[in-house]
Amino acid sequence: MKRKISILGSTGSIGRQTLDVVRAGGDTVLALTANRDAARMEEQCREFRPELAVMMDPEAAADLRVRLADTDIRVLEGMEGLIEAATIPKVDTVVTAVVGIVGLRPTIAAIQAGKRIALANKETLVCAGELVMKEAERWGAQIVPVDSEHSAIFQCLQGCADHGEVKRILLTASGGPFWGKTRAELETVTLADALKHPNWSMGAKITVDSATMMNKGLELIEAMRLYRLSAEKICVVVHRESIIHSAVEYCDNAVIAQLGVPDMRLPIQYALTWPERGEAVAKPLDLFACGTLTFAPPDEENFPCLALARRAAAQGGTATAILNGANEAAVGRFLAGEIGFMDIPRLVERAMEHVPAGAASTLEDVFEADRAARAWAAE
């Protein structure tokens, strides 16, 4: 079935790969959104001819209006435009590929409009997972994960009649570019080093998160919310080759895993076509060529972000929003050259120690915790 799609974050890595899948599958794009890259947005708009284009940055929106003046494409800006893109009546699927907590409001708006959510914005579930899942249940919205690990888990659960049969989830991690380094060695790594992921091509923020292993901590929390499991039932496994994307162990000790080449177009395509599968857009996996597959426990001493995420998961409430907000702010400072690599976990831990965690009963609870955490990480 051909779908009508809105892509939130179309100029980023996931957004661009989603458009690759659209080219191959022939779905219709009705809305595209981005932050500031008006030049790339113009290119995408001229190719896919959406009804609506949204730029979060007002100056970029003004630029795009000039660039698209010869078309009938509407150009909006800011959060209001992002929410409109997520709720267009004719759209059936919203791909949430924006980075950070900015994706929370439009995702909830799309849920309340009954859309299928192809979820690539993990921060939505990290910060407000209980609220989001309750809204999805209330409005009958499907949430299909796009992250390669969560897509793998989702696929491994397709034959599961009762989630009570799940013994644990085996959440794989590449270990990023610094696996095996000591804390002393990590103190001296550079931004250029952190942006060299061994297996995946991703945006700068998620690549740094992978290097600190915060990305795996966020995914652990996301898995808890998506599959309604305790943190104790999620085991992180470092698998350097990124061939097994995750696995599910059942009560009878059977383990079902999903394997594939490290290509984000595969989980993106599955999120769009589920419960069916489309013709391949990713290369086939050659088991004779992929070599030895290795597995190791995570190193939470030298990569403390994962331990901080576990602590936030155990606390619950707004603790996960505090974790995420502080991390977003700290990574932003690292990308700007203001702090060192190991300052990221230090700032996150300081925010967690100083911002009290409470109940996440409303979105305002979540956003207030986020604001407070960012303030501590900015000092």
Image (tube, rainbow, N blue to C red):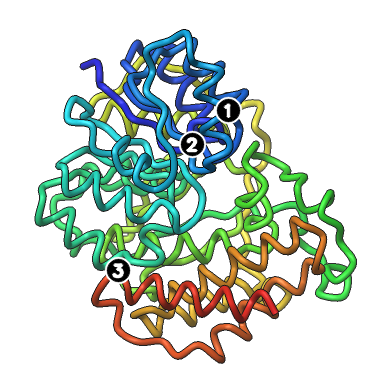
Q: Is residue 260 visible?
A: no
Residue position marked by numbered label 3 in the rendering: 363
Examine the rendered structure and indicate whether residue 128 appears above or below residue 265.
below
Q: Position of residue 31 (x, y in %)?
A: 36, 27
Q: Position of residue 81 (x, y in %)?
A: 36, 40
- Give the residue displayed 60% in from the left and 58% down from the top: 238
The mark found on residue 55 in the picture is 2
Q: Earlier in the sequence, mark 1 or mark 3?
A: 1
Q: Are marks 1 and 3 in contact (CB under 8 Å)?
A: no
Q: Position of residue 214 (x, y in %)?
A: 59, 64
Q: Residue 231 is drawn in which quadrant?
A: bottom left
**Toward the viewer: 61 or 189?**
61
Q: Earlier in the sequence, mark 2 or mark 1?
A: 2
Residue type (three-letter) at the residue carrying disc 3: Leu
Q: Position of residue 101 (x, y in %)?
A: 45, 58
**Toward the viewer: 285 or 353?**
353
- Give the residue displayed 49% in from the left and 43% down from the top: 56
The mark found on residue 78 in the picture is none
Question: Mark 3 to mark 2: distance in Å?
Answer: 23 Å
